[in-house]
C-alpha cells in the first residue's frame, strides 16, 4: 500500500477557491428563502439575577411579529459532562448576554423592535465575576442546584463553583520534593480570553417541514447540533436534520451548538423558515472564548538536570455554564504535563463557574496557555540550575518508551530529532539583528498536542462514469481538509485523480455519526473512515475486473483511472468500464467505512475525571523566533519565526504550510495584543473590531517551515492532523524570546507595549492567587463530592 | 424615495431609506452577497466595493452617498467564468481558506495592483492592505499573489 500513500501526496488545489474569490460562495449568512422570518434574542443585561416577571403579551402584538418563545417552550438542559445549560435562562440569569426570549418577525428591524416591548423584571443577585471571587469562602454559587443536574459522563469531582475537577497522581510526589538534593522552582501565570473572531458569525436558517426540523447552520459539529437541539427542545433526535453550507471560519467557536435551537423552535411555532444571525456585538460578547486561566507550577530538579517531580494547579474559567471547559480539564495532564520526562506527577485541573459569558473551544484549546506556562517555567528551571535552555530541553524531552504524565508509554523519538532540525533551520534562516538600540532575544520551545480521534463514518459511491462520491458529515471550515486531504485519500485508494472524487457537504440525513471538524481530526478520523470505505469499493472493483480480464485480483494495478495487469500498462480496462459492468451485473458499487479512537491506555489508577486518559495520536511542535523589543515604547517586533511540525505524513504540503502560516499569526495575536476581559458590570469589554485588535498584514512575517514526517501514527497513510497545532507554542515562544531580550520574568500574556514597559521598569506585579492554596491538597475537592 | 445608482454597469433604482447601508442594499435588495458585513464599522474590509473606482467600505456608506455613482462589487469584477488576474493569482498561490475576507481583498487588490498605484514591494503591499483583515491565512500568500500580479504587468 505504500505506492497508494505516495500517490496520495500532492498539492491538489482546493476546488472551492474560485467561487470564494468571485464572491459566489453562499455561506449560511448569504442564504435566504421564500417566506423567511428574521429572529432576534432578548439577552440579559445583568450578570446575575432572579427573573421576577417576563411578559411577552405586548411584544406579540407588535407589527410583523410571528412567534415569541421563552424558557417555557424549551424544557431541556444540555452540556458536556454535566447537563447544566438550559436554552433560555430559567428563573435565574447567570451572565450578561444570556438569552431570555426569542422573537421571529417579518423583518429583522421588527424582531428587534419587539424585543424592546418584552416586559422583563430582574432582581439583581450578587455576582462572581472572576475565579478568585468564585473560589472565595462563602462565595455565592453560580448554580445553587448543581447537585441536582444530570451527570452525562461520570468520574469528575464537582462541588460548589467547581464545575469539574480532573486530577493526575503518579508516583511519590512528596518524596520527590523532600529530596535534599533537588532544586525547587515555582512559577505562576495568568492569561486572558481570546476571541476567535471568525468572519462569519454564528448563523442559522431553520425550517420545520413534514414534522421534522431542517437546520442549515454554520457549525463544525452537525451531529452535536442535532443531538443538543433534541435535548433542549425535548424532541427525538431523529426529527432533526442538519446540513452545513461552507463555513466562514470556525477555529473552535462553532464546535458547539449555538443559535440553532432558537431558530428551530421559532420555525416550528411560526410554521415559517427562520433566520437567526448574531450581530458582531453579540458575537464578541458571547464568544465561547479561549478561556482565561491561572496556572501554578512547581518542579523538583535533580543535580543532573532531570525532573524528579512536577506539581501543578490549573484553574480554567468556564463562565456561567460548564461547556467545553469541563472536557478541557482533561488536556492539562497532556499539555502542562507534556513535553518532558517526569518522575512523579501531581496535577489538578479545575473548571470554575463564574457569572460571565461561557467560554468554549479555540484551536489547541487549553494547550496554548499551558504550553506558555510550561515553557516559561522550563526556561526558569534552566536558569535556576545554570543550564542552557536548549540543553535542558534536549536532555528531557519525551522519547521512545518514555512515560507521559498519565503513564502512557510514548512511541518513537520525535521531539529530539525535531529539535535538531530546528537548529539546522535556524542556521539556514538567520535573523538580521536590530542594531538600533532595541533589545534582541530569541527562544526555542517545544509543545505537545494530539489528534482528537473518536467516531467517524463515510460512504463511497462508485459511479458508472468513473467518478466517486464521498459522503460524510465532515464540514469545510476553511482548512481545506474536505477539499484536499479527503478526496486525495479516496482517489489514491481507487487509482483516480482527486478531481474525480465529489465530496458531499455535511448532511446528518445522508451520512453517519461524526464527532465534528476540529481537534485535527478531519484528515485522521474522517480520512480513516473514507479510506476504509474506498478500500471496500476497490476490492469490489478488482473482483469484477479480474473476471473481465481473466487475471487474478492480486495481479492487477489500479492507477490513472485504469485497472491493468501489473507490468502491462494498457492491457486492461478503465475504472469507468469496470464500474459500469459491476453496476449492470451486481448493482451499483458502494463501500462504507468507520473509525474511532484506539483507546491507548494510561497507567492504571493514576487519573481521575479525565475524558481522555492517554493520547491516541500525540502531535509535537518545535517553534523558534527572534524578536526585537523597543525599550522606549515596549513594542515587540517579531524578526523571524520558524516552525518544525510533526505531521506524520504530509498529504498536501501546500495546504499544511497555509495552516501553519495562519495558525502562527493567530498565535502572534494572542501573544502580543489579543485579549478580552470582563468589566465591572459583568459584560465583556471588547465589543467590536475597534477594541479587539487582531493581526494585520503589516504585523506578520513569513513563517519558515519544516515538516517532520515519519513519526508513528494510527492515522490513514500515517497522517496526523496539521491545522490545529500551529498555534500551540506561539505564546510560549514569543514570551520566552521577550524574557531573554529583557531579562525579565514573564507571567502574563499578551505582551502589549504597556505590559512590556511595566516589565522593563520593574513595575509588573507577579500574579497573586490567594484562592490557590499553597498546599496542593487545598486545591482538591475531598473524595465524596462526586455528585 | 428612490435612489438611482449604477451597480456593476447596470442602472438600478432603489426604494430604500437614504441612510440604509450600501452593503445591505447590495445584499438584501440586489442579492449580491459577495460583499460581507463582518464588522459593520469600517475596520475589516470584507464589505469593500469600488465607488467610482475607489475602494470604499460599503458598511459605512449610506445609500444616498452612492446616488448617481458607479458601484462595482466583486461580482462585477468577474466576467462569466474567467477570473481576473488578481483572482487567478490568489488561486495560483493557494491563498484561500475560509474565504470570507476575499471578496473585499479582491476589490482592494484590484485597485492596488493597477499600474502606478503601489510600489511592488512587500511593505508597500502590506501597507495597502491595512484596511483588509484576514483571520485565517496570515496574509503572506495574499502579498505574494499581489506582487506576482504587479510584476507580470506589462
Ligand atoms: S463590514 Fe465593512 S469594513 Fe467590516
Ligand atoms: S480566508 Fe478566512 S478571513 Fe480570510
Image: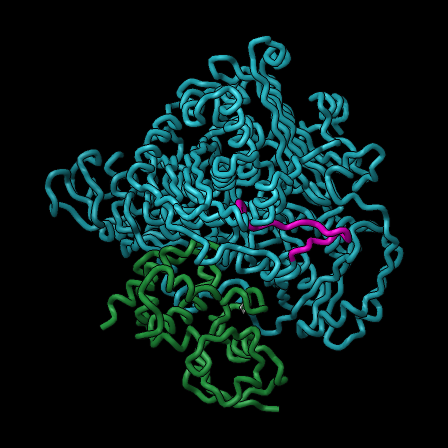
Q: Which quarter of the picture shows residue A523? A: top left
Nearer-the-camera pick, A455 or A768: A768
- What colour-coding does the image apply? by chain
Q: Colour of chain A?
A: cyan
Nearer-the-camera pick, A697 or A570: A697
Q: Position of residue A395 (x, y in %)?
A: 42, 20
Instruction: Specify start and end residues of the magenta stretch as a single range.
Output: A670-686
Please tell me which residue is depicted at 49% across the width and 16% down the height of the picture: A306
Please tell me which residue is depicted at 67% across the width and 49% down the height of the picture: A677
Q: Which quarter of the picture shows residue B143? A: bottom left
Look at the image and tell me whether residue A79 can be seen. Answer: yes
* Residue A715 higher or lower than A575, as above or below: above
The majority secondary structure of the magenta stretch comes to loop
Q: Position of residue A664 (x, y in %)?
A: 45, 46
Nearer-the-camera pick, B16 or A310: A310
* Residue B59 higher or lower than B144, as above or below: below
Q: Colour of chain B?
A: green
Q: Residue A681: within the magenta?
A: yes
Q: Residue A600: within the magenta?
A: no
* Residue A178 higher or lower than A284, as above or below: above
Look at the image and tell me whether residue A453 can be seen. Answer: no
Q: Quadrant of the C terminus of chain A?
A: top right
Nearer-the-camera pick, A233 or A314: A314
Please tell me which residue is depicted at 39% across the width and 58% down the height of the picture: B96
Say left or right for A388 vs A497. right
Q: Position of residue A527 (x, y in %)?
A: 40, 42
Say left or right for A657 vs A72. left
Amino acid at each position: 500500500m505504500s505506492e497508494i500513500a505516495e500517490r496520495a501526496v500532492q498539492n491538489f488545489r482546493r476546488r472551492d477557491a474560485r467561487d470564494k474569490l468571485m464572491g459566489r460562495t453562499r455561506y449560511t449568512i448569504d442564504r435566504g428563502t421564500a417566506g423567511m422570518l428574521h429572529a432576534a434574542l432578548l439577552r440579559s443585561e445583568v450578570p446575575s439575577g432572579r427573573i421576577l416577571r417576563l411578559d411577552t403579551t405586548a411584544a406579540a402584538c407588535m407589527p410583523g411579529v410571528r412567534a415569541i418563545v421563552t424558557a417555557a417552550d424549551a424544557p431541556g438542559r444540555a452540556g458536556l459532562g454535566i447537563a447544566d445549560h438550559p436554552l433560555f435562562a430559567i428563573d435565574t440569569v447567570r451572565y450578561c448576554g444570556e438569552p431570555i426570549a426569542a422573537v421571529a418577525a417579518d423583518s429583522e428591524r421588527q424582531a428587534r423592535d419587539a424585543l424592546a416591548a418584552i416586559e422583563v423584571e430582574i432582581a439583581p443577585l450578587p455576582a462572581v465575576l472572576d475565579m478568585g471571587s468564585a473560589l472565595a469562602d462563602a462565595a455565592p454559587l453560580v448554580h445553587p442546584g448543581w447537585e441536582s443536574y444530570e451527570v452525562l459522563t461520570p468520574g469528575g469531582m464537582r462541588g460548589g463553583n467547581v464545575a469539574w475537577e480532573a486530577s493526575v497522581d503518579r508516583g511519590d510526589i512528596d518524596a520527590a520534593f523532600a529530596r535534599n538534593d533537588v532544586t525547587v522552582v515555582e512559577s505562576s501565570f495568568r492569561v486572558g480570553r481570546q476571541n476567535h473572531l471568525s468572519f462569519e458569525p454564528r448563523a442559522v436558517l431553520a425550517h420545520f417541514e413534514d414534522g421534522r426540523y431542517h437546520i442549515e447552520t454554520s457549525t463544525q459539529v452537525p451531529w452535536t447540533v442535532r443531538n443538543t437541539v433534541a435535548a433542549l427542545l425535548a424532541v427525538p433526535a431523529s426529527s432533526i436534520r442538519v446540513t452545513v453550507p461552507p463555513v466562514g471560519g470556525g477555529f473552535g467557536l462553532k464546535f458547539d451548538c449555538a443559535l440553532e435551537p432558537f431558530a428551530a423552535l421559532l420555525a416550528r411555532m411560526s410554521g415559517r423558515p427562520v433566520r437567526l444571525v448574531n450581530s458582531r456585538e453579540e458575537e464578541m460578547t458571547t464568544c465561547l472564548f479561549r478561556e482565561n486561566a491561572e496556572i501554578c507550577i512547581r518542579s523538583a530538579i535533580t543535580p543532573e538536570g532531570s525532573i524528579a517531580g512536577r506539581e501543578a494547579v490549573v484553574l480554567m474559567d468556564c463562565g456561567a455554564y460548564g461547556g467545553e471547559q469541563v472536557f478541557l480539564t482533561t488536556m492539562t495532564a497532556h499539555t502542562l504535563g507534556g513535553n518532558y520526562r517526569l518522575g512523579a506527577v501531581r496535577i489538578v485541573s479545575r473548571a470554575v463557574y463564574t457569572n460571565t459569558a461561557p467560554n468554549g473551544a479555540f484551536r489547541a484549546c487549553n494547550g496554548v496557555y499551558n504550553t506558555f506556562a510550561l515553557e516559561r517555567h522550563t526556561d526558569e528551571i534552566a536558569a535556576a540550575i545554570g543550564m542552557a535552555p536548549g540543553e535542558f530541553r534536549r536532555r528531557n524531552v519525551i522519547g521512545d518508551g518514555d512515560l507521559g504524565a498519565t503513564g502512557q508509554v510514548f512511541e518513537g523519538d520525535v521531539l529530539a530529532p525535531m529539535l535538531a532540525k530546528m537548529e539546522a533551520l535556524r542556521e539556514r534562516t538567520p535573523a538580521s539583528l536590530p542594531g538600533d538600540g532595541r533589545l534582541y532575544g530569541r527562544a526555542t520551545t517545544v509543545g505537545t498536542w494530539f489528534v482528537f480521534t473518536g467516531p467517524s463514518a463515510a460512504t463511497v459511491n462508485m459511479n458508472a462514469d468513473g467518478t466517486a462520491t464521498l459522503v460524510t458529515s465532515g464540514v469545510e471550515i476553511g482548512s481545506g481538509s474536505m477539499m484536499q486531504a479527503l478526496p486525495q485519500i479516496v482517489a489514491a485508494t481507487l487509482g483516480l485523480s482527486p478531481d474525480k472524487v465529489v465530496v458531499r457537504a455535511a448532511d446528518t440525513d445522508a451520512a453517519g455519526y461524526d464527532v465534528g471538524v476540529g481537534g485535527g481530526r478531519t484528515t485522521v478520523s474522517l480520512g480513516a473512515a473514507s479510506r476504509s470505505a474506498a478500500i471496500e469499493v476497490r476490492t469490489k472493483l478488482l473482483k469484477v475486473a479480474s473476471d473481465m480480464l481473466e487475471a487474478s485480483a492480486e495481479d492487477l494495478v489500479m492507477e490513472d483511472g485504469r485497472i491493468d495487469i501489473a507490468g502491462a500498462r494498457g492491457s486492461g480496462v478503465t475504472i469507468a468500464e469496470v464500474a459500469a459492468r459491476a453496476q449492470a451485473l451486481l448493482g451499483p458499487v458502494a463501500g462504507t467505512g468507520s473509525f474511532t479512537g484506539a483507546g491507548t491506555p494510561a497507567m492504571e489508577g493514576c487519573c481521575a475525571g479525565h475524558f481522555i486518559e492517554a493520547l491516541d495520536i500525540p502531535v509535537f511542535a518545535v517553534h523558534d523566533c527572534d524578536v526585537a523589543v523597543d525599550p522606549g515604547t515596549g513594542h515587540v517586533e517579531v524578526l523571524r519565526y520558524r516552525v518544525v511540525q510533526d505531521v506524520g505524513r504530509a498529504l498536501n504540503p501546500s495546504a499544511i504550510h497555509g495552516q501553519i502560516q495562519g495558525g502562527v499569526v493567530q498565535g502572534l495575536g494572542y501573544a502580543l495584543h489579543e485579549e478580552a476581559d470582563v468589566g465591572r458590570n459583568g459584560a465583556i469589554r471588547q465589543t467590536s473590531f475597534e477594541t479587539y485588535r487582531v493581526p494585520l498584514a503589516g504585523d506578520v512575517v513569513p513563517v519558515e517551515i519544516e515538516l517532520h514526517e515519519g513519526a508513528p501514527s494510527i492515522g490513514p497513510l500515517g497522517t496526523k492532523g496539521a491545522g490545529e497545532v500551529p498555534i500551540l507554542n506561539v505564546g510560549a515562544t514569543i514570551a520566552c524570546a521577550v524574557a531573554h531580550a529583557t531579562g525579565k520574568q514573564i507571567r502574563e500574556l499578551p505582551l502589549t507595549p504597556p505590559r512590556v514597559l511595566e516589565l522593563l521598569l520593574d513595575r509588573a506585579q507577579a500574579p497573586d492567587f490567594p484562592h490557590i492554596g499553597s498546599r496542593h491538597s487545598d486545591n482538591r475537592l475531598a473524595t465524596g463530592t462526586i455528585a | 424615495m428612490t435612489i438611482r445608482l449604477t451597480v456593476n454597469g447596470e442602472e438600478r433604482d432603489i426604494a430604500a431609506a437614504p441612510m440604509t447601508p450600501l452593503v445591505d442594499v447590495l445584499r438584501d435588495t440586489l442579492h449580491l452577497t459577495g460583499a460581507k458585513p463582518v464588522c459593520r464599522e469600517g475596520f475589516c474590509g470584507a464589505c469593500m466595493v469600488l465607488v467610482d473606482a475607489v475602494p470604499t467600505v460599503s458598511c459605512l456608506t449610506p445609500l444616498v452617498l452612492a446616488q448617481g455613482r458607479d458601484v462595482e462589487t466583486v461580482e462585477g469584477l468577474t466576467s462569466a467564468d474567467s477570473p481576473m488576474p488578481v483572482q487567478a493569482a490568489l488561486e495560483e498561490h493557494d491563498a484561500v481558506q475560509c474565504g470570507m475576507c476575499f471578496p473585499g481583498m479582491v476589490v482592494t487588490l484590484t485597485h492596488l495592483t493597477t499600474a502606478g498605484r503601489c510600489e511592488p514591494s512587500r511593505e508597500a503591499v502590506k501597507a495597502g492592505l491595512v484596511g483588509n483583515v484576514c483571520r485565517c491565512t496570515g496574509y503572506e500568500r495574499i502579498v505574494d499573489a499581489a506582487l506576482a500580479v504587479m510584476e507580470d504587468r506589462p
